[in-house]
Amino acid sequence: MKNSLLVLLIYQSNMMKRLVTICFMLVVLVANAQKPKVWVISDGGDGINDPDDISAIASYLLMSNLFDTRAIVMASTVHAWNKETSDQGIWASEFFGKAYSSDLPNLKKHIGGYQSDFRFIESSIKGQGNNFDPKEDVNLKDYPSILALYKEVKKSKEIINVLCWGPLTEQALFVKYCLDQNKHNVLSKVRFISHWSSSNYHTGTMENPELTHNCVGDPIACDYMKVQALNGLIKFYECGAIGQFGIVENAQKGSDYYDQFKASHLGKIFAEGKFKKERVDDSDCATYWVLIGDYGVSLDDLAGNGLNMPEVEKRNEEAFASHAELIRHEILRRSNAAAGKVDAIESDYYIAPRGRIERK
Ligand SMILES: [Ca+2]
């Protein structure tokens, strides 16, 4: 009798251990599943293009515990004069990677959920000199950065959000390859979120919304993407110019404010990447604030078919404008956390009854 009781107790204890393990695994799975997967394609780099992308990557990295970042592609621009520049993936791993790993211990301690490192890749179209040509076959072996995206999407069970911070050449090559190969299952797992590849009000007009830098950078690729989106073959969320004229131009002004960011390594890159006209310009950031969705504009506020209607762009610009100071405050809070300024950190957590720590 005693023996069978002992066996029962051991059995129950083993079952309990298994249940605890399963619960823990479920919590980890749920926590990871909740984070949107992201693939950033930037046309910035070391001395390449507008330095606003440098500030945008720094602010993205400070916010990155909200995402599962699969890669950050650098220098995705065909301008021939960039051809002989050094490898931008190696440069970014060094430049951003070092700053991130210096800030990481405090970010992990005070905020949590940050991944240990990032994969920076140089774009395969850097300096190629010619725009997208829809009549040419695409061989992904010629484009390692696009092949890397293809492999990532293929193996993923979730949607990959491709944040588009420059011209759309790389994206168009990816889409054309998938369509030519009938890989609709791959395309169905991708969502393009693009900044300023159209605008009704800023550089573009209501008659010609496509006359923006990111669209004119490769007009054929831009047009190709918009046509595929309108035909329902890809999901394409056009932000318009709301990062610039919603967030950047309505955020705090002055070096006194932005000097505060220099306490952390990433904050310093953010503050110095493009500080002009008394404010930091990281306008491509609109794409990830839209994905976060808690600051006035979410993906639900954009059309998924590439269209950017005037009233929609106006509404979203105003919504970001009214959240611009909060957005900067959030970056500063994280920069302070990264710098270990514990007294300046508001906690993301509170102590629930019985001492449980819960997210606010
Ligand atoms: Ca850019």
Image (spheres, helix red, strand yellow):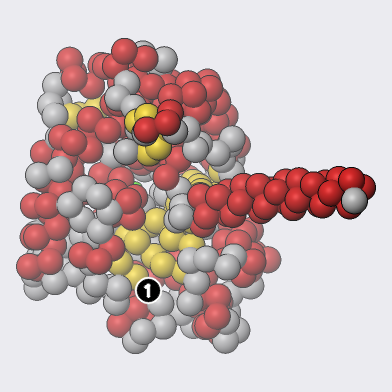
Rendering coords of residue 90 (x, y %): 60, 37
User: Label 1: few (<14), some or many (≥20) within 10 Å?
Assistant: many
The residue at 32%/60% (across/down) is 194
- From the viewer's perspective, tell me whether residue 203 is left or right of residue 39: left
Q: Residue furthest front?
A: 1
Question: Which quarter of the figure has residue 336?
Answer: top left
**290 or 183: nearer the eye?**
290
- Name which residue lies at 11% across and 39% down: 250
Q: Quadrant of residue 199?
A: bottom left
Picture coordinates of residue 266, whole percent (x, y): 41, 26
Residue type (three-letter) at the residue carrying disc 1 = Lys
> Which quarter of the picture shows residue 269?
top left
Q: Residue at x 43, y 24 (%)?
A: 110
Q: Is residue 222 visible?
A: yes
**Mark 1 highlights which residue?**
235
Q: Please indicate, yes or no, whether residue 204 appears anywhere in the rendered image.
A: no
Residue 245 lies, with reference to residue 273, above or below; the image says: below
**On the picture, is 92 further left or further right than 310?**
right
| Front one among 359 and 282 | 359
In this rendering, the count of numbered labels is: 1
